Image (spheres, grey):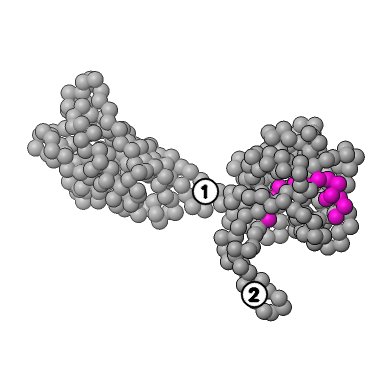
Amino acid sequence: MNNYFIILASGQSKRFNSNKPKQYIIYKNKPLFKHSVDKALESKLFRKIILVVSNKKQIKDKFPKNVILIKGGKERSDSSLIALKYIKKFKPKNVLIHDAARPNFSLKLLKNIIQLLKDNNAVIPTINSTDSIKYKVKKQLFNLDRNNSILTQTPQGFKYYNLCKVSFNQKIKIQDEATLFINNNLKIKLIKGENTNNKITYKDDIKDNKMFFGIGFDIHRLVKRKILYLGGVKIPFHSGLKGHSDGDVIIHSVIDALLGAMGKKDIGTFFPDNKKKFKNIRSPKMLKPIVEMVNKNQFYINNLDINLICEQPKVSKYRDKIIKSLSHLLKIDSSLINLKGKTVEKLGLIGKEKAIACDAIISLTKHD
Ligand code: ZN
């Protein structure tokens, strides 16, 4: 296991537009560079992991002994050269060079590269471009055939000896080590890279969409001579729900869940039950402005789960209809809505069919 992993994390992130270098920003709960360190450690494939940074004092994390911090150079190619020279004393066999800005590579990819280095001097993951590529010579534009164009990713694996031979003589700034092999007409083994292993270059690449949850609960008494509405659906039943409005417990819980997730108080704030205006109002009419509020505030609904608590009617009989109605009212796909029926062993008011209650929980995501 004479393998070494070099992580280049000393970039200046000129395109990132933030006062913090991007390798230190928090991405999926930890600093960006740490994803690569942790994955390399987890793989147990490397004798040493070399983390190349611009300022060692900026790294507060405690790492195991086999993670070594070194100071990089001005450009990416300087940093990689410094790291290659640094590990010379360990007499490495294989070295993988990786950009810390790619936190999403898989352990499988690491294993694959190491495996293939047995018979190859350079192993480079590549993907096909999904965008059309043009290139410019002076002021003239040319098309590059997408089918003949590939994009190289990191980690890139090399036999240490072969990489040093081309690295130590390099005179030009390079964007990756594969370039050196190509410039020197050396053979490289191309392997399939990972579409998810994208490089984080711009702030937009890591938009951290926040998730919010809201719960709602409602209960109404069942009374004769009223129509029963559940989730906006008219249900044939001996009684209906008493209330200032049509008493639709499902819609009322959903409204409270939505307001809860958005941090906007409760249904009573928007529809006070002492207002004549709302007397006998149909609940879908109450839900409408709340759904508009969701959209206006850049939220979207991830999913909705509902417990309808009643002895009768049987939820299974009306489930599809209610879900279809809610899907229409909330403007979301019906697969995102789940409705459960719950009886209460004939206990209390609900058990005696004198009331129906409902719980709802909803998850929203806010666009940045
Ligand atoms: Zn209600």
Amino acid type indicated by mark 1: Asn
Secondary structure state at the residue bearing disc 1: loop
Measured in 3D between alpha carbons, the distance from the residue under mark 2 to the one under mark 1, in whole angstroms, is 38 Å
Amino acid type indicated by mark 2: Phe
Give the residue displayed 88% in from the left and 38% down from the top. 90
User: Measured along the vertical axis of the image, is residue 187 above or below residue 216?
Assistant: below
- Of 24 and 119, which appears nearest the observer? 119
- Of 322 and 160, which appears nearest the observer? 160
- Of 274 and 20, which appears nearest the observer? 20
User: Measured along the vertical axis of the image, is residue 133 above or below residue 304?
Assistant: below
Secondary structure state at the residue bearing disc 2: strand
Give the residue displayed 28% in from the left and 50% down from the top. 328
Residue 224 in which image quadrant: top left
Q: Is 154 inside the magenta-drawn segment?
A: yes
Which residue is most to the bottom?
139
Q: Position of residue 206 (x, y in %)?
A: 59, 51
In the image, is the residue at mark 2 within 8 Å of ligand 1 by its beta carbon?
A: no
Q: Position of residue 195 (x, y in %)?
A: 59, 51
| Residue corresponding to mark 1 | 209
Report whether 180 appears left or right of 116: right
Report the disc number at residue 268. none
Closer to the observer: label 2 or label 1? 2
Instruction: Write the start and end of the magenta stretch as one range.
Output: 152-166
| Residue corresponding to mark 2 | 142
